[in-house]
């Protein structure tokens, strides 16, 4: 289910504050804004910023582009690695 229109999209207030601060300092510095808030929705003002999203172990750098707007940050920092299906021992 999607979120109620009345409530609006969720974005962590601390993350918004960090993004606005990094915008003010200028685009010459490529600062990675780190966050643990995987549930935050990507806003249009995040475009062009690299956000470090925690995957449970490390921070995964995610460069925000136009087509990511409206998605959640956690969608782009996978928590599990897929190593392929194991080989079947019974096949000969």
Image (cartoon, rainbow, N blue to C red):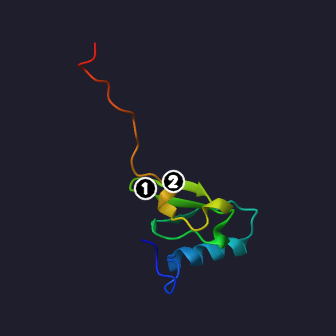
Does residue 66 appear in this view? yes
Q: Going by the picture, which residue comes out furthest to the front?
A: 1
Q: Nearer the viewer, residue 71 or 27?
A: 71
Residue at the (49%, 58%) spot, across then down: 75
Label 2 packing within 10 angstroms: few (<14), some (14-19), many (20+): some
Residue at the (67%, 72%) spot, across then down: 45
Q: Which residue is mark 2?
A: 60
Residue 69 left/right relative to 55: right
Q: Going by the picture, which residue comes out furthest to the left?
A: 90
Residue 54: name its quadrant.
bottom left
Q: Nearer the viewer, residue 40 or 19?
A: 40
Residue 30: name its quadrant.
bottom right
Residue 63 left/right relative to 57: right
Q: Nearer the viewer, residue 31 or 60?
A: 60
Q: Is residue 8 above or below residue 71?
A: below
Q: Which residue is mark 1?
A: 55
Label 1 packing within 10 angstroms: few (<14), some (14-19), many (20+): some
Tell me the CA gap for discs 2 and 1: 7 Å
Residue 89 left/right relative to 17: left
Q: Position of residue 15 (x, y in %)?
A: 54, 73
Residue at the (70%, 72%) spot, across then down: 23
Of the residues under marks 2 and 1, which one precedes in the sequence?
1
Q: Secondary structure at mark 1?
A: loop
């Amino acid at each position: 289910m999607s979120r109620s229109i009345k409530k609006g999209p969720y974005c962590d207030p601390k993350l918004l504050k960090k993004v606005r601060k990094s915008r003010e300092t200028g685009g010459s510095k490529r600062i990675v804004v780190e966050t643990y808030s995987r549930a935050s929705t990507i806003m249009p003002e995040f475009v062009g910023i690299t956000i470090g999203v925690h995957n449970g172990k490390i921070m995964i750098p995610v460069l925000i582009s136009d087509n990511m707007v409206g998605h959640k940050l956690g969608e782009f920092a996978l928590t599990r690695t897929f190593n392929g299906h194991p080989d079947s021992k019974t096949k000969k």
